[in-house]
Image (tube, coloured by chain):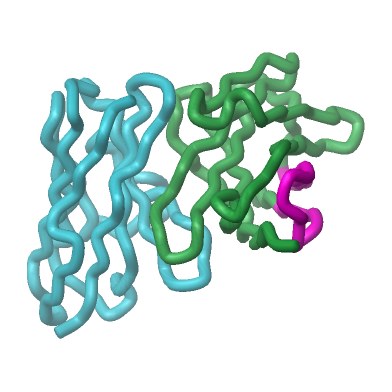
């Protein structure tokens, strides 16, 4: 199985800050990576697919980049509504696997 | 508006079979472009992909669960279902159903999730 490792596990930032979350794959997954946002008590919501494609309706402050084994999710200006746990997921090979999550808090 | 809704017992005894159904509205499970999947999330932890089904009945399962999992589809009811046999406490989780565009492997629509507890 491809292991997905996110860092940091938790981050605390101020409103308006630029936030970066990293996801590393244990082997190359080309650009087959998705990012999700999960708020407490809710299902995950797709933000980014194929590493950098923004899902329809997702605010443009979210962006994704990377290929191979290293990927980043950037929130360009953190908003209170962005408090959530963020997960990466590889869809390059079976079984599809997720990172352990990054919890984003407001300082 | 695509909506998915999980249903099924919230409590299952150890060694028994967990059975859940996902009802799809706003789309058809026979749409050529989509696969239909199950994902679970143990309390307070991360996400695990269980498997998917295509409307033809073709399936793909996570090897970690393959020996115990069956996913089926009922096109007449626009539903797909999950059966997980010989459950233990480790199978206690929130179970989500989700749509997979074009078999690409990411999940664009999710159900709200249903908590299944394995306990005697």
State the image coordinates of residue B107 (x, y, percent, origin top left).
49, 40
Lateral position of residue B85 relative to residue A67, left or right:
right
Q: Which residue lies furthest to the bottom in this view?
A: A107
Name the one closer to the observer, B55 or A98. Answer: A98
Colour cyan maps to chain: A
Name the one closer to the observer, B118 or B37. Answer: B118
Residue B87 sits in which quadrant? Answer: top right
Give the colour chain B carries in the figure. green
Placement of B32 over or under B65, stated as above or below: above
Identified at 76% across, 35% down, the residue is B80
State the image coordinates of residue B71 (x, y, percent, origin top left).
71, 29
State the image coordinates of residue A89 (x, y, percent, origin top left).
34, 39
Residue B86 sits in which quadrant? Answer: top right
Identified at 33% across, 76% down, the residue is A81
Lateral position of residue B96 relative to residue B83, left or right:
left
Identify the magenta region. Answer: B5-26
Identified at 29% across, 55% down, the residue is A101
Name the one closer to the observer, B103 or A77. Answer: B103
Identified at 65% across, 51% down, the residue is B1
Placement of B80 over or under B32, stated as above or below: below
Q: Can residue A23 be seen in this view?
A: yes
Lateral position of residue B106 relative to residue A3, left or right:
right
Lateral position of residue B110 relative to residue B80, left or right:
left
Say whether residue B24 is magenta. yes
Placement of B31 over or under B114, stated as above or below: above
């Amino acid at each position: 199985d491809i292991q997905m490792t996110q860092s940091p596990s938790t981050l605390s930032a101020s409103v308006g800050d630029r936030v970066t979350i990293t996801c590393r794959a244990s082997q190359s997954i080309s650009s087959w990576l998705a990012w999700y946002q999960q708020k407490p008590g809710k299902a995950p919501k797709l933000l980014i697919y194929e590493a950098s494609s923004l899902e329809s309706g997702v605010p443009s402050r979210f962006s994704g980049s990377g290929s191979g084994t290293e990927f980043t999710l950037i929130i360009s200006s953190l908003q209170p509504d962005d408090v959530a746990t963020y997960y990466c997921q590889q869809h390059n090979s079976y079984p599809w696997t997720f990172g352990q999550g990054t919890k984003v808090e407001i300082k | 508006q695509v909506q998915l809704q999980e249903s099924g017992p919230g409590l299952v005894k150890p060694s028994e079979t967990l059975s859940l159904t996902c009802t799809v509205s706003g789309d058809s499970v026979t749409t050529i472009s989509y696969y239909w999947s199950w994902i679970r999330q143990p309390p307070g932890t991360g996400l695990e992909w269980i498997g998917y089904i295509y409307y033809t009945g073709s399936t793909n399962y996570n090897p970690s669960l393959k020996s115990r999992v069956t996913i089926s589809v009922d096109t007449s009811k626009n539903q797909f279902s999950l059966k997980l046999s010989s459950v233990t406490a480790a199978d206690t989780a929130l179970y989500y159903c989700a749509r997979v565009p074009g078999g690409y492997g990411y999940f664009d629509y999710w159900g709200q999730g249903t908590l299944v507890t394995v306990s005697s």
